[in-house]
Amino acid sequence: MYQDPSDSPVHSPTPTHTTTTVERGSFCLARCACGWSGPARRSRDRARTDAEEHRSSHASGSSRSHQEKPR
């Protein structure tokens, strides 16, 4: 079967920011499809907040790199 090259999927130059939380023992951390990973937290809620902050910082067009915000 022949596939027309113009039908190939378009790849975005920037990765999408799809976040999730991962549990490791008694810790929970946020991860993103772009490769970013938040700090390990004992609070799942805080890990979800880290994920949301990461996602929203990139949705607003922030120029901040994939680093944790200073606290």
Image (cartoon, helix red, strand yellow):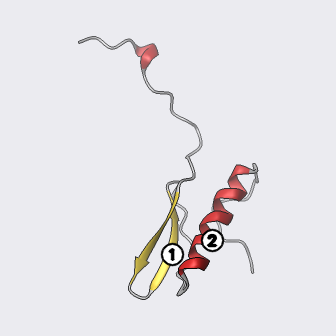
Res 8 → quadrant: top left
- Residue 51 spot, x, y in % from top left: 60, 66
Res 13 → quadrant: top right
Q: Badge 2 local density, few (<14 within 10 Å), some, or many (20+)? A: many
Residue at 33% of width from left, 14% of height from top?
3
Is residue 62 placed above or below 29 in the rendered structure? above
Please give left or right for residue 53 compared with residue 41 in the image. Answer: right
Please give left or right for residue 29 compared with residue 57 in the image. Answer: left
Instruction: Check the image and name the residue furthest to the front.
Output: 45
> Disc 1 marks which residue?
29
Which image quarter holds the N terminus? top left
Query: N-terminal of the two: label 2 or label 1?
Result: 1
SS type, badge 2: helix
Is residue 15 placed above or below 41 in the rendered structure? above
Residue at 46% of width from left, 14% of height from top?
6
- Residue 65 spot, x, y in % from top left: 68, 59
- Residue 26 spot, x, y in % from top left: 43, 88
The numbered disc on residue 50 is 2
Residue at 76% of width from left, 53% of height from top?
62
The amino acid marked with disc number 1 is Leu
The numbered disc on residue 70 is none
Viewer-proximal residue among 70 and 18: 18
Q: Do the residues labelled 2 and 1 touch (CB within 8 Å)?
A: yes
Marks 2 and 1, Cα distance to the nearest angstrom? 8 Å
SS type, badge 1: strand
The amino acid marked with disc number 2 is Asp
Q: Badge 1 local density, few (<14 within 10 Å), some, or many (20+)? A: many
Please give left or right for residue 10 compared with residue 70 in the image. Answer: left
